[in-house]
């Protein structure tokens, strides 16, 4: 530090110029912080747009095909000067909200549907408006308590003990990555061990598992795809045999990944029996319940997911079976210390923050330091509505899938396994048609339904057969939409003769 010296005249001019420039810049940046009147105008325009969307939603298509796929967005590049909110909203509605899939609509029955609870949208608004920091307890004690409280709530739901912990990630892919990284470090795997480490999973496991293994440096690890039964569930006798064969070859069985609700068919692997094998073989047992997890709120789901409480780690996506907007996945680890060991960090600039005792900070148990305040979008709907309507909606989805499974057969469709959860697979297989012909017909049905758009179905390949999927998960999807879906399928079949 130097001693201040008396101001010379030349310095006085410089100082005046500096002050003038500061005033100028303050004025020029004023629009970043709109006053109450301006905020009201912005808010009305934004909420009016949300209202327009929500009021039209019941008649909106599940998928909207447009010529330009939103390309006109690019006609308005970011420039030095802004545009009025009305113009921005017009662009947003025309080029962004309209084209493509509409996961908020009842007719969205493709892939894994979303939803986007309104209460969560308001939570997001409050989280962003306050910009509360949610990564570190010192900075946002309430925000961190809220996240940890929700982690605890889900841990209780799946039957983990008090030693469990986790965090809210952006989705299932990153939640899987956190779990796999934790499993790697918990078993002390070093790079020299990777080529002999074996991961057991089925070919129906989600591709994010594969991706996570590679990102975690484990691209060389052996993936042992375990045979499935005729309902696409892992066969535990085959798992046993696979582990024994690998051990005989000098390999190290390391990780068993079961799926509770596969993406293709919604199949739930036999978690309890797998847990027994994992314990005996001292393998890390991970359950990917990204889609199926919150069905545990229903009686049927609880029975299906029995054994998840014995896993070492699990992921559940609130943005799937808890109807939140995209961007929320949860990872839970039975021993929170294992999660912390894999994600610990330190930095001198954090010394004030980490000295404060209290709750475990999300930053200590995740790859993120700064993170959006995601807990609020989950807490607000749950605290306002209670769990009851969620439970009801999830049971309704299970029953709608069963209903569809029966009804689609009366139309003459051939069906896959009866649904474990809320996904039904089916195909049109007229007598005498070759496999290629049948595949083409089913492709034409899915394409035709998407062009019609009232319902949006997706497809997959199962045992080399082009198969149509109907996934019911949106909280706005009720029986009338499933009946509409059946009518659309009937029309498509008629159209194709
Ligand atoms: C959706 C899904 C994932 C990936 O989650 P994202 O939230 O899309 O990143 C992983 N596993 C399963 C079983 C899923 O359904």
Image (cartoon, grey):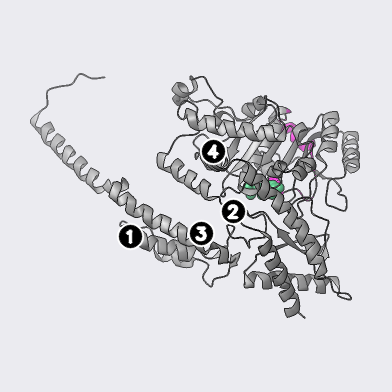
Query: SS class of the residue under badge 2?
Result: loop
Q: Nearer the viewer, mark 1 or mark 2?
A: 2
Residue at left offset 81%, top offset 72%: 438
Pointer 3 local density, CA inside 10 Å: few below 14, some 14–19, many at least 20: some
Q: Label 3: which residue? A: 54
Q: Which residue is mark 1?
A: 84
- Residue 327 covered by magenta stretch: no
Residue range in magenta is 187-210
Marks 1 and 2, the one that precedes in the sequence? 1
Residue identifier under label 2: 115
- Please state the horizontal and vertical placement of residue 2, each as a whole percent of the image: 23, 20
Residue at (82, 55) in percent of width and height: 418
Label 1 crowd (10 A; few <14 / some 14-19 / many >=20): few
Question: Can you tell which of label 3 and label 4 is closer to the viewer?
Answer: 3
Question: What residue is disc 4 on?
Answer: 375
Q: CA distance from mark 1 to mark 3?
A: 23 Å
């Amino acid at each position: 530090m130097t001693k201040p010296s008396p101001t010379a005249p030349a310095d006085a001019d410089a100082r005046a110029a500096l002050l003038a420039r500061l005033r100028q810049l303050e004025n020029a940046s004023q629009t970043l912080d709109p006053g109450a009147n301006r905020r009201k105008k912005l808010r009305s325009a934004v909420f009016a747009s949300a209202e327009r969307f929500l009021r039209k939603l019941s008649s909106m298509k599940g998928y909207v095909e447009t010529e330009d796929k939103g390309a006109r967005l690019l006609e308005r590049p970011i420039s030095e000067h802004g545009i009025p909110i009305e113009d921005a909203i017009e662009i947003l509605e025309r080029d962004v909200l309209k084209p493509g899939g509409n996961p908020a609509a009842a007719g969205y029955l493709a892939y894994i549907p979303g939803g986007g609870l309104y209460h969560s949208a308001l939570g997001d608004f409050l989280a962003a408006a306050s910009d509360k920091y949610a990564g570190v307890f010192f900075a946002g004690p309430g925000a961190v308590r809220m996240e940890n409280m929700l982690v605890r709530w889900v841990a209780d739901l799946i039957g983990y003990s008090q030693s469990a912990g986790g965090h809210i990630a952006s989705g299932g892919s990153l939640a899987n990555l956190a779990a796999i990284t934790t499993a790697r470090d918990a078993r002390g795997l070093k790079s020299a061990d990777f080529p002999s480490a074996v991961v057991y999973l089925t070919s129906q496991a989600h591709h994010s598992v594969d991706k996570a293994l590679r990102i975690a440096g484990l691209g060389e690890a052996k993936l042992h795809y375990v045979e499935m039964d005729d309902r696409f569930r892992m066969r535990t006798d085959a798992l046993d045999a696979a582990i024994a064969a690998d051990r005989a070859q000098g390999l190290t069985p390391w990780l068993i990944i079961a799926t509770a609700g596969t993406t293709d068919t919604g199949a739930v692997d036999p978690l309890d029996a797998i847990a027994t094998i994992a314990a005996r073989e001292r393998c890390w047992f991970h359950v990917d319940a990204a889609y199926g997890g919150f069905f545990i709120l229903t009686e049927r789901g609880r029975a299906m997911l029995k054994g998840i409480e014995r896993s070492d780690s699990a992921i559940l996506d609130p943005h799937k079976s808890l109807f939140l907007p995209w961007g929320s996945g949860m990872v839970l680890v039975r021993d929170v210390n294992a999660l912390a060991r894999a994600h610990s960090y330190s930095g001198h600039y954090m010394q004030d923050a980490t000295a404060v005792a209290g709750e475990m900070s999300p930053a200590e148990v995740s790859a993120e330091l700064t993170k959006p305040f995601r807990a609020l979008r989950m807490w607000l709907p749950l605290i306002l509505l209670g769990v009851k309507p969620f439970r009801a909606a999830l049971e309704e989805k299970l029953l709608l899938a069963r209903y569809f499974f029966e009804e689609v057969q009366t139309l003459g469709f051939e069906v896959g396994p009866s649904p474990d959860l809320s996904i039904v697979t089916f195909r049109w297989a007229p007598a005498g048609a070759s496999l290629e012909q049948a595949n083409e017909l089913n492709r034409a049905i899915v394409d035709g339904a998407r062009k019609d758009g009232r319902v949006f179905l997706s497809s997959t390949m199962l045992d080399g057969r082009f198969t149509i999927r109907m996934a019911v998960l949106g909280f706005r999807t009720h029986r009338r939409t499933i009946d509409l879906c059946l009518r659309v399928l009937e029309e498509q079949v008629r159209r194709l003769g």
